[in-house]
Image (spheres, rainbow, N blue to C red):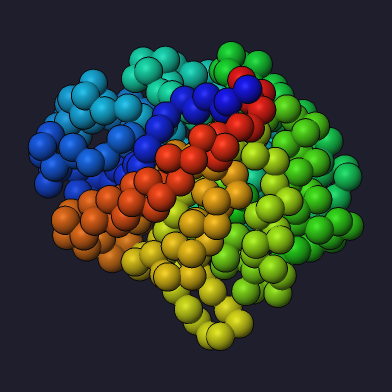
């Protein structure tokens, strides 16, 4: 049967730096928005009122920063319950997290790579399952950018697919991360992408990166999306069918009109394939 996504179309990550510049009419071409719940839980005052106003008029998803799925410390269940309250309060359609770890005795303020091992598959999957039990919903995990692979016993794609299956969870497909990792770790980005299960995709991310050298890309979310990443998104839609996709921009924020033009371009790429019904025949786990 056809895949039913919880959101549709093209989206934009909401940042406080441009919240005040957003007008309801300027969001006509934005189908959904995304926030990191850690940045908005218990926020009051002007920002809290502005977020409440926009969340009541826009469809939202959440992309977490500190669930610490691969970390050595026990899962922070009180924090997960706070996430649940936020998701329910704002009628958030989907909650995703990075397939990484970010805490030891304290926050490391970065997303660290999890060793690609069978032991890690079972450990992380159990934490995802417990999170899903508390939230009473399936979450999505994101394929992350990484710059080293300590203790790897399997490939990145084998590790990711094993967790998707073991945890019975969804995938936040980050197109830019595939491209960045393919350069840094010298693999074929298309072959990697085509090895992912279409029926697990919840939605996608696209973003810009920094080219440090010909063989070193840095995932910054601080630049325009490159042509090679746009091309990879096009191939993703051709292979998987159109899935909801969101633009991330965290640094060097351009004028809102520029951000909206990139969101509009996502929609233009989607329209190339929306007329082909065969692109939607994937099996849903939902």
Q: Residue at x 26, y 28 (%)?
A: 58
Quarter of the C terminus within the rendering: top right
Q: Quadrant of residue 72?
A: top right
Left or right? Give the position of 56 relative to 226: left
Residue 239 image offset from top left, x and y in percent: 60, 49
- In-front residue for pair 52/272: 272
Q: Residue at horizontal 76%, vertical 43%?
A: 161
Image quarter (top left, top right, bottom left or bottom right) of the N terminus:
top right
Confirm whether residue 48 shows in the render. no
Q: Nearer the viewer, residue 255 or 20?
A: 255
Q: Is residue 231 above or below residue 284?
A: below
The percent position of residue 194, horizontal first and vertical second, equals 68, 53
Q: In this rendering, does residue 249 appear at all?
A: yes
**Quadrant of res 78:** top right
x and y percentages locating residue 209 in the rendered image: 45, 68
Placement of 93 over or under 242, stated as above or below: above
**Looking at the image, which is closer to me, 104 or 278?**
278
Number of numbered discs overlaid on the protein picture: 0
Q: Residue at x 61, y 82 (%)?
A: 215
Quadrant position of residue 252: bottom left
Q: On the rendered structure, is 2 left or right of 21?
A: right
Residue at figure coordinates x 66%, y 28% from the top left: 283
Q: Position of residue 234 (x, y in %)?
A: 49, 57
What residue occupies the far bottom of the structure in this picture? 214
Residue 206 in the figure: left or right of residue 182: left
């Amino acid at each position: 049967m056809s895949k039913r996504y919880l959101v549709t179309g093209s989206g934009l990550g909401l940042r406080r730096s441009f919240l005040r510049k957003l007008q309801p009419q300027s969001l006509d071409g934005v189908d959904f928005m995304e926030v990191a719940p850690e940045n908005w839980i218990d926020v009051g005052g002007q920002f809290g009122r502005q977020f409440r106003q926009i969340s009541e008029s826009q469809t939202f998803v959440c992309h977490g920063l500190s669930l610490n799925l691969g970390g050595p410390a026990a899962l922070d269940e009180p924090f997960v319950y706070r996430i649940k309250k936020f998701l329910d309060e704002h009628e958030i359609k989907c909650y995703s997290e990075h397939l990484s770890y970010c805490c030891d005795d304290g926050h490391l303020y970065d997303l660290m790579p999890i060793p690609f091992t069978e032991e890690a598959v079972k450990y992380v999957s159990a934490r995802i399952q417990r999170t899903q039990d508390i939230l009473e919903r399936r979450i999505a995990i994101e394929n992350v950018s990484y710059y080293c692979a300590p203790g790897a016993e399997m490939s990145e794609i084998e590790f990711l697919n094993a967790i998707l299956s073991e945890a019975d969870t969804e995938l936040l497909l980050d197109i830019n991360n595939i491209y960045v990792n393919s350069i840094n770790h010298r693999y074929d980005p298309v072959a990697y992408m085509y090895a992912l299960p279409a029926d697990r995709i919840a939605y996608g991310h696209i973003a810009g990166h920094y080219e440090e050298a010909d063989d070193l890309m840095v995932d910054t979310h601080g630049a325009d999306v490159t042509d090679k990443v746009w091309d990879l998104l096009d191939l993703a839609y051709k292979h998987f069918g159109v899935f909801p996709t969101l633009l991330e921009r965290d640094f060097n924020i351009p004028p809102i009109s520029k951000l909206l033009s990139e969101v509009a371009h996502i929609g233009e790429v989607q329209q190339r394939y929306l007329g082909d019904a065969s692109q939607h025949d994937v099996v849903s786990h939902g």
